[in-house]
Amino acid sequence: MRTRPRPLTHSHTGTGTGTGARTLGVTLTAALLTVSLAACGQEAKGGSRYKPDTGKGGTIGLAMPTKASERWIADGRNMAKQFQKAGYRTDLQYGDDKVENQVAQLENMITKGHRLLVVAAIDGSALTDVLRQAHDAGIPVISYDRLILGTKNVDYYASFDNERVGEQQGRYIVDKLKLGKSDADSDDSHSIELFAGSPDDNNTKYFWNGALKVLQPYLKSGQLVVRSKQTRMNQATTLRWDGGTAQKRMDDLISKSYGDRRVDAVLSPYDGISIGVISALKSAGYGTKSQPLPVITGQDAELASVKSIIRGEQTQTVFKDTRKLAAQTVQMGDAMLTGKKVEVNNTKDYDNGTKTVPAFLLKPVSIDRKNIRLLVDEGYFTAGQLK
């Protein structure tokens, strides 16, 4: 129940009422209070934890992780614009990659009585307490792109098929290095280094698992060799998806494991990491005719990386049209708040450790120089932006 009944008081002036009338008034007041509290207890104990409202209006809280990545800026703006078009006000906040900031922002949204929270978590496991507050206030929650972990107080999940993202990255490396399925006994081998996303982002394991599902047969056959021997996800993670952190790790990998040997491919799960990897490789002498850059994957089709692909540096990215993800999230949120059926297409794969969260997953698209025009055709970038 979102509000408590105001305390009931009994005033007696000694005029106009006898003892019987006063007793009857107290009895009726007590009965009404008992009914009111019982009703509140029933509402909190069973049934839906929020009441759909057939009317539009109210404020939607949008909690995004950071402004350091252009994709999160775009995500926030797209959702705000589309929720407003659907008849809602919006409160868009960015946590600057600090968990305490995001928690404080969510607490403020709850205090203000926002009707719905859409949360792209900085740390998916750090929001249990604040989402319990949302639950107690009767505010539903959509987990946006990053699955919120360890709590039952998340209603739906909207994202892309994250395992497919990893599969597309792994498949691109296999195809680009021409690792045929029938060449398992080939003496030719290629060196590869593996990067993973932030350890506190649940998506990281999906990207990793998808990529390794494709790459593992070639690692097992020896066609792909990780010379650093850092083949476990916990050895490859990049806190907060930070490009500078990736650059330092790539510097270290080159100096310790390669010497006069060449890096042929780098599995990078995100464009910002890819940019850091490329900086390290260039510092080590890559990017020339005699020493070209390796195959380097990415994700999010950020403008800097798209331009890098056009220049022949980064090799591939995975395009996730966040406008479509925003539109899907708005549809889900509006359906929740107006008592309509919420559309989902996955009800079994996204277990957050406490519950399996019903999800809607969109399809990603692999992009390289051959089909980069698709980003213009889809209106994601203008031709001028890519020059």
Image (tube, grey):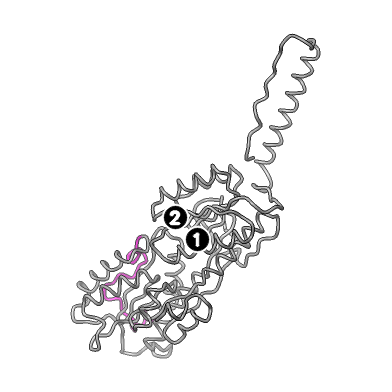
- Looking at the image, do the residues carrying marks 2 and 1 touch, with CB atoms under 8 Å apart? yes
Depicted 134 relative to depicted 292: above or below = above
The C terminus lies in quadrant: bottom left
Characterize the local packing of mark 1: few (<14), some (14-19) or many (20 or more) Cα atoms within 10 angstroms.
many
**x%, y% of residue 179?**
39, 87
Residue 74 position, x and y percent, is 48, 65
Q: Residue at x 40, y 70 (%)?
A: 270
In this rendering, position of residue 229 left or right of residue 182:
left
Name the residue beneath numbered marker 1. 76
Relative side of 247 to 150, left or right: left
Camera-nearest residue between 327 and 285? 327
Q: Which quadrant holds the N terminus?
A: top right
Q: Nearer the viewer, residue 290 or 151?
A: 290
Please give the range of residues in magenta.
Answer: 218-239
Q: Which mark is residue 65?
A: none
Q: Residue at x 47, y 49 (%)?
A: 127
In this rendering, would 325 be left or right of 203? right
**Where in the figure is residue 94, as x and y percent of width and height?**
44, 55
What type is the residue that disc 2 sits on? Tyr
Amino acid on which the number 1 mark rests in the picture:
Gly
Q: Label 2's element? A: strand
How many numbered discs sit on the rendered protein?
2
Q: Quadrant of residue 88?
A: bottom right
Which tag, 2 or 1, sits closer to the chain's start?
1
Q: Nearer the viewer, residue 332 or 237?
A: 332
Per the model, the C-alpha gap separating discs 2 and 1 is 9 Å
Residue for badge 2: 94
Q: Is 69 included in the stretch rendered in magenta? A: no
Give residue 316's quadrant in the image: bottom left
